[in-house]
Amino acid sequence: GMRYSLPNARFLLQKTGMDQVFQGQATDIALEVRNIKKWNELMNVEISKVTGQSLERIDNDLKRDFYLSSEEAVRYGLIDEVLLPMPGKRTPPSDVVDLGSFQSGSEQKYQREGAPPAEGQQQQPGAPGQGMFSNGNDDDGPKIAKG
């Protein structure tokens, strides 16, 4: 067959339709339960055909959630093969990673630097260009109060 899996895959087999509380009149609940049981039985027959497992084993396995690793799924008959990487196809990573070239202007700009205050807003103390952090002769980068 052509049923494949990757090595780290997990499989979950479970019954359907039993995850919520049934509400309504007793006859409606009985119809719903009968329908769910019918579809679960049909699903078990199909799983039995696909996997080659007996209906009794499938019924027993699906009493609760049934988890399988990829290797267990092969043994159970759910898949045919686990795909593994071919050693000859891999190329070793190089020591140098080319990240491309970065472009920027000659001077570094900060958010809102030199921008006029928006209408109706005053510039906050300590903002570039005014207040105690700027004394006009600070030429060594960020405006820092000197004491």
Image: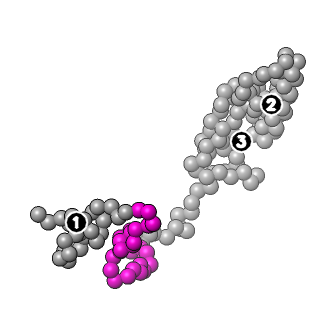
Q: Which residue is mark 3?
A: 77
Q: Quadrant of the C terminus?
A: bottom left
Residue at 29% x, 69% y is 128
Q: Is residue 122 visible?
A: yes
Camera-side residue: 147 or 75? 147
Q: Residue placed at 82% from the left, 38% from the top?
A: 46
The image shows residue 2 at horizontal and vertical percentages of 74, 54
Find the residue positioned furthest to the bottom: 106
Relative to 30, say whether 117 is above or below: below
**Which residue is under mark 2?**
40
The answer for how far apart the CA atoms under marks 3 and 1 are is: 74 Å
Q: x, y (%) of residue 64?
A: 66, 27
In which quarter of the view is residue 61 placed? top right
Q: Secondary structure at mark 1?
A: helix
Whether 48 is drawn above or below 85: the answer is: above
Q: Nearer the viewer, residue 11 or 74?
A: 11
The residue type indicated by label 1 comes to Phe
Question: Quadrant of the rendered structure where residue 92 is?
Answer: bottom left
Badge 3 element:
loop
* Residue projecting furthest to the front: 120
In the picture, the disc for residue 133 is 1
Would you call the spot at circle 3 few (<14 residues within 10 Å), some (14-19), or many (20 or more)?
some
